[in-house]
Image (spheres, rainbow, N blue to C red):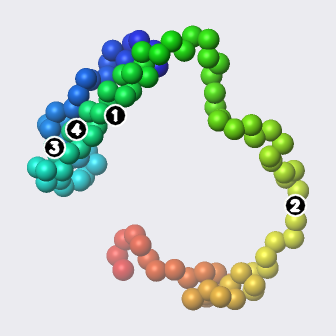
Amino acid sequence: MSAVVASLMPDALTPGDVRAIASLARLALTDEEVDLYARQLGRILEYASQVAELDLGGVPPTCSTSDASGAERADVARPSLGRDAALANAPDATGGLFRVPRVLGDA
């Protein structure tokens, strides 16, 4: 984490900050939850601040923590499950398609 990013990170979150974040996430929090989350998020920020202080100049960037070389198989076409077999255990199938309950719009 760069010094610029670390300097932009607040030292702690106030209950007002937590309420604002909860509002953005459309969460209704009790006063006790606001206080709890302010403390918990404050501890996370403290830890992030400690990490930001580390000298990572000689550490190469890492995109994975495991050596995944050779873990991928070749992309080869293979026979797939036929439509009848795929629909055999469907609770509701119509016209060769899965029928599912409507989740958006008017029911």
- Residue at label 2? 77
- Residue at label 4? 39
From the viewer's side, name the closer residue of 7 and 25. Answer: 7
Q: Nearer the viewer, mark 2 or mark 3?
A: 3
**Distance CA(mark 3)–CA(mark 1):** 14 Å
State whether residue 52 is above or below residue 74: above
**Distance CA(mark 2)–CA(mark 1):** 46 Å
Q: Nearer the viewer, mark 2 or mark 1?
A: 1
Identity, as a three-letter code, of the amino acid under mark 3? Asp
- Label 3 packing within 10 angstroms: few (<14), some (14-19), many (20+): some
The mark found on residue 13 in the picture is none
Under tag 4, what secondary structure? helix
Identity, as a three-letter code, of the amino acid under mark 1? Ile
From the viewer's side, name the closer residue of 22 and 42. Answer: 42
Sequence-earlier tag: 2 or 3: 3
- Residue 34: image location, x then y, percent: 17, 46
**Distance CA(mark 2)–CA(mark 3):** 55 Å
- Residue 107: image location, x then y, percent: 36, 80
Under tag 1, what secondary structure? helix
Left or right: 97 as drawn, with respect to 77: left
- Residue at label 1? 44
- Residue at label 3? 35
Is the Cβ of the residue at disc 2 closer than 8 Å to that at disc 4? no
Is the Cβ of the residue at disc 3 closer than 8 Å to that at disc 4? yes
- Label 4 packing within 10 angstroms: few (<14), some (14-19), many (20+): some
- Label 1 packing within 10 angstroms: few (<14), some (14-19), many (20+): few
Is the Cβ of the residue at disc 2 closer than 8 Å to that at disc 1? no
Residue at the extreme left: 31
Sequence-earlier tag: 3 or 1: 3
**Distance CA(mark 1)–CA(mark 4):** 9 Å
Identity, as a three-letter code, of the amino acid under mark 4? Arg
Left or right: 79 as drawn, with respect to 8: right
